[in-house]
Amino acid sequence: MKISIIVPCFNSEKTILSNLSSISSQDYKNYEVIIVDNVSNDQTINLVKKFNFKNLKIISEKDNGIYDAFNKGISASTGEVISHLNSDDFYCHSFVLRKVIESFSENIDAVYGNLIYVKENNIKKKTRYWKSSDFEKGSFFKGWSPPHPGFFFKKYLFEKYGKYNLDLGIPADIVFMYNLLERKKIKSKYININLVIMREGGRSNQSLKQIILQNKTLLRSFGIINNPLKIIIFLFFKFLNRSKQIIIGKFI
């Protein structure tokens, strides 16, 4: 089973090496790397080319944000399974792709695991630990979702159920997974393995206003924006989940 690894980037010369090194070190080799570059003007693309990946595609053109880049990358992919790996993220271990593929079967459409957050300029400093769990119906209404960088899914889902919605902004990844798991009822499998390390920064550095707007987008997408009780439940459990991640992250 072939994996298409989508790497959106823009002026990513400071982080792209750790990203690509984590890919090249995988002991499962049936993959392609698709770089979707928003016309970087630094050394990003030159660094990419030095890796000499056997299957490499570079799309270099202006895009409308990270989810536009994901959509472009998936459309250009030839693998059965899709992995999103932002240019400042990297796989935790050399066996990540192998373990993921071993977990797929004919009736499993998505496999996901855990995510570790680290300081932007100090990857040895862990700040959050996103330990996921098996999906249960209604989980998204309690502030739950799989960590998107650790969410691997079969490409046909993208072709059958649609692309990332660019109009939603940052929450588009959660809504995408919600549509697949909660609404379309695809078959998923959680594996209790740390799959991806994510640097904090960028999307993580949000103002209170941005956080409020993003949560309103989620509540509206989940169809509970006019239900005060469900809003309270969502916000309570989301705060609880995030607090646990931060506390555990300081001790792992």
Image: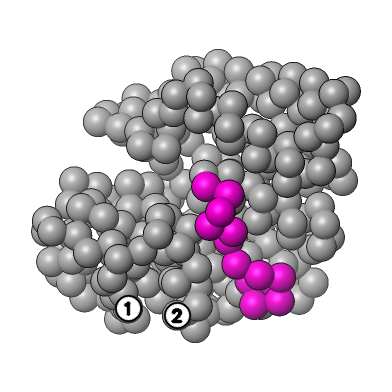
Residue 167, placed above or below residue 194:
below
Spot occupied by residue 85 in the image (x, y as percentages of width and height): 43, 56
Residue ID at (57%, 72%):
81
- Report which quarter residue 134 is drawn in: top right
Residue under circle 2?
76
Residue 158 included in the magenta stretch of the image: yes
Spot occupied by residue 37 in the image (x, y as percentages of width and height): 29, 64
Which of the two labelled residues, at mark 2 and mark 1, occupies the earlier sequence position? 1
Q: Main secondary structure of the magenta part?
A: helix
39 left or right of 205? left
Residue ID at (85%, 41%):
138
- Label 2 SS: loop
> What is the CA distance from the residue labelled 2 to the residue labelled 1?
9 Å
Residue under circle 1?
57
**Mark 2 surroundings within 10 Å by alpha-carbon count, few (fewer than 14), some (14 through 19), many (20 or more):** some
Spot occupied by residue 8 in the image (x, y as percentages of width and height): 36, 60
In the image, the segment drawn in magenta is: 157-169
- Label 1 SS: strand
- Report which quarter residue 73 is drawn in: bottom left
Spot occupied by residue 153 in the image (x, y as percentages of width and height): 63, 65
